[in-house]
Image (cartoon, helix red, strand yellow):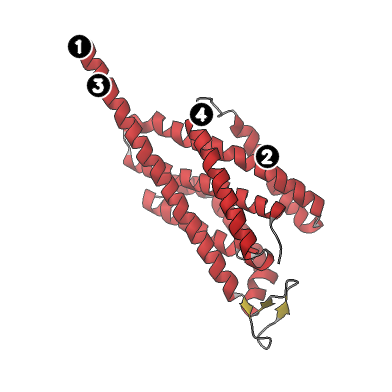
Amino acid sequence: MAQYQSVRTTTGVQADIDAGLRAHMNKVYGTMSVGLMVTALLAWAISGLTVTTDPAQAVLMMPNGAMLNDFGRTIYLSPLKWVIMFAPLALVFGSGIAAQKMSAAGLQLYFYVYAALMGLSLSSIFLVYTGFSIAQTFLITSIAFAGLSLYGYTTKKDISGWGSFLIMGVIGLIVASIVNIFLQSPMIMFAISALGVLIFAGLTAYDTQKIKTDYIAHAHAMDSEWLGKSAIMGALNLYLDFINLFIFLLQMFGSRD
């Protein structure tokens, strides 16, 4: 009888953990999806505000024929473009400190501010690539991300060892990308994009498994504040994986206007 009660208790605890994990992952994916929506809508809206159809209001003609107004010149061609470019990177590096100092609600707001800044930073893609190409790449990225994240969630293989190698790869990509801002080499850009796709494909699976294992390791404590912050940080990591997969795929295969 005691053995039966022990088995029943163990089964009940495991069922609670499984249900909690599903709810936790739903929150992660939900928060990430809202962040992607904020980024996409803001990028599209800002790109529309930077161009004009009235030649009298145009201050610069882009190679694709788009006519930039004063606002477009300010955010794309003035020194402000460097602030817009690197502000999201600064927030990513500060996210660890934010997770320690802020409440779960504050951290969620931090994430959405980051998503908005990323939308501002990415708005120029609507002036460079065709709308069809952007939509097609987004769909491909969504399918690839779903498959990779599903693999990370369901695989029995421990892929935690990928972490240090992949992070080193990300650092290398950042350095190479900054250098190529000045070199403007198409060959280097293609190599960066190809490596970026591989690295962030691996990170999608790795981060998904890490979110799962971290939850299981801490589920017994039932710390609602920790669980809330963990879900937001998990959403941020997967958001970054998705955005970077999208950008690198667009750079490799996107059709320019």
Q: Please, which residue is most extreme toward the left here?
A: 1
The residue where tag 4 is placed is 155
Residue 9 tag number: 3
| Any part of residue 229 in sight | no
* Amino acid type of the residue that numbered disc 1 sits on in the rendered structure: Ala
The residue where tag 2 is placed is 169
Question: Under tag 1, what secondary structure?
Answer: helix
Q: How many marks?
A: 4
* Amino acid type of the residue that numbered disc 3 sits on in the rendered structure: Thr
Q: Residue at x 52, y 49 (%)?
A: 239
The residue where tag 1 is placed is 2
> On the rendered structure, is 89 left or right of 26?
right
Q: Nearer the viewer, mark 1 or mark 2?
A: 1
* Amino acid type of the residue that numbered disc 2 sits on in the rendered structure: Gly
Image location of residue 2, percent across then percent down: 20, 11
Neighbourhood count class around disc 1 (C-alpha, 10 Å): few under 14, some 14–19, many 20 upward: few
Mark closer to the chain start, 1 or 2 = 1
